[in-house]
Image: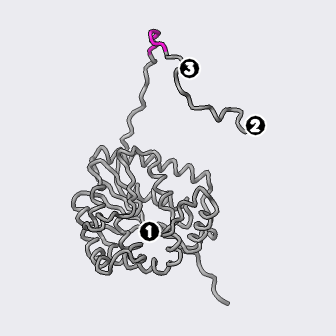
């Protein structure tokens, strides 16, 4: 009789027990409180933080980024998701288009995909030459070490999803008009090149998983688990202190009877499409 396979990272989400919704919501809220404290520490101490989010299509990167940034000041924490390079950018030094988006003191930058496009989609889809690919693999670790020497805190996440779970998410996007826009022609083609992407990822890790800038792999077959695990790891990766200010006591508002509001009829109000009676018919 064949032995039953043990559960391991990468197994489909349908085979794994998921965290209860109320527990997830409570822990996410707690972690988001800590993210606000981290943000304020980064701003106060003048730290420069870069977080890279990579992985397969539909691996859940966007959902994690949304939960991280939900309560953070966009002036301190910003998301960079670059589109297809222009003809001019294609002639530049490869890393050049990413450099202007690096953080100044007191800033956090989250790259929703990054310079690792060359090691992944460009390699698999043939958007770069073999020479360009080999040059990237050789110089990327040097580039990242240069960033770290300049004082940047660099954290890299790879979101790993099984082929069965990725297929389930692709089908979900096809059936939901709100999500269908996420399924680009490139995503559809990547579905047909699972093995090629796996080989490209393995080669990329072999060259760029360095002691100074290691890859942190997030098992993302269960999205809620991936969100909590990634945020917790991010918080643990940057020592910070709680700079939450003391509660503020507001003085009573002054009543200035000399001010008279202009007539409501002089203003253009948005129609009240929704009221307390909406949906009762």
Of mark 1 and mark 3, the one earlier in the sequence is: 1
Image height check: is 17 above or below 30? below
Q: Residue at x 32, y 65 (%)?
A: 87
Residue 253 located within the stretch drawn in magenta: no
Does residue 44 show up? yes
Residue 256 located within the stretch drawn in magenta: yes
Colouring scheme applied when the structure was drawn: one colour
Give the image location of residue 201, x and y in percent. Answer: 41, 76
Q: Which residue is mark 2?
A: 280
Label 3: element kind: helix
Q: Residue at x 33, y 57 (%)?
A: 50
Residue toward you, 12 or 129: 129
- The label on residue 265 is 3
Give the image location of residue 202, x and y in percent. Answer: 41, 78
Left or right side of 138 for 191: right
In the current view of this chain or complex, which residue is farthest to the top? 258
- Camera-side mark, 1 or 3: 3
In the current view of this chain or complex, which residue is farthest to the front? 87
User: Which quadrant would residue 73 be assigned to in this image?
Assistant: top left
- Camera-side mark, 2 or 1: 2
Q: Which residue is mark 1?
A: 217
Which range is magenta?
254-260
Q: Quadrant of the C terminus?
A: top right
Of mark 3 and mark 2, the one earlier in the sequence is: 3
Label 1: element kind: strand
Distance from Cα at disc 2 to Cα at disc 1: 49 Å
């Amino acid at each position: 009789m064949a032995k039953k396979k043990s559960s391991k990272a990468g197994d489909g989400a349908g085979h794994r027990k998921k965290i209860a919704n109320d527990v997830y919501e409570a822990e996410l809220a707690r972690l988001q409180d800590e993210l606000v404290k981290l943000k304020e520490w980064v701003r106060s101490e003048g730290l420069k933080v870069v977080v890279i989010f990579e992985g397969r299509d539909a691996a859940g990167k966007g959902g994690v980024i949304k939960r991280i940034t939900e309560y953070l000041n966009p002036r301190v924490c910003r998301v960079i998701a670059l589109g297809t390079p222009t003809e001019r950018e294609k002639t530049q030094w490869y890393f050049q288009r990413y450099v202007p988006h690096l953080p100044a003191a007191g800033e956090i930058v989250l790259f929703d995909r990054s310079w690792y496009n060359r090691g992944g989609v460009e390699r698999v889809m043939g958007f770069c030459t073999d020479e360009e690919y080999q040059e990237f693999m050789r110089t990327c670790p040097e580039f990242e070490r240069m960033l770290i020497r300049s004082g940047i805190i660099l954290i890299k996440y790879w979101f790993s999803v099984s082929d069965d779970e990725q297929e389930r998410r692709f089908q979900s996007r096809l059936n939901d008009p709100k999500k269908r826009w996420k399924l680009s022609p490139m995503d559809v083609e990547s579905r047909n090149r699972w093995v090629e992407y796996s080989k490209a990822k393995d080669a990329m890790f072999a060259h760029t998983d360095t002691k100074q800038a290691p890859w942190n792999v997030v098992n993302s077959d269960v999205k809620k688990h991936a969100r909590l695990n990634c945020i917790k790891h991010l918080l643990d990766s940057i020592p910070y202190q709680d700079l939450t200010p003391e509660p503020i006591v507001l003085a009573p508002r002054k009543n200035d009877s000399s001010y008279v509001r202009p007539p409501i009829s002089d203003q253009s109000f948005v129609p009240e499409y929704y009221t307390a009676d909406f949906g009762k018919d």
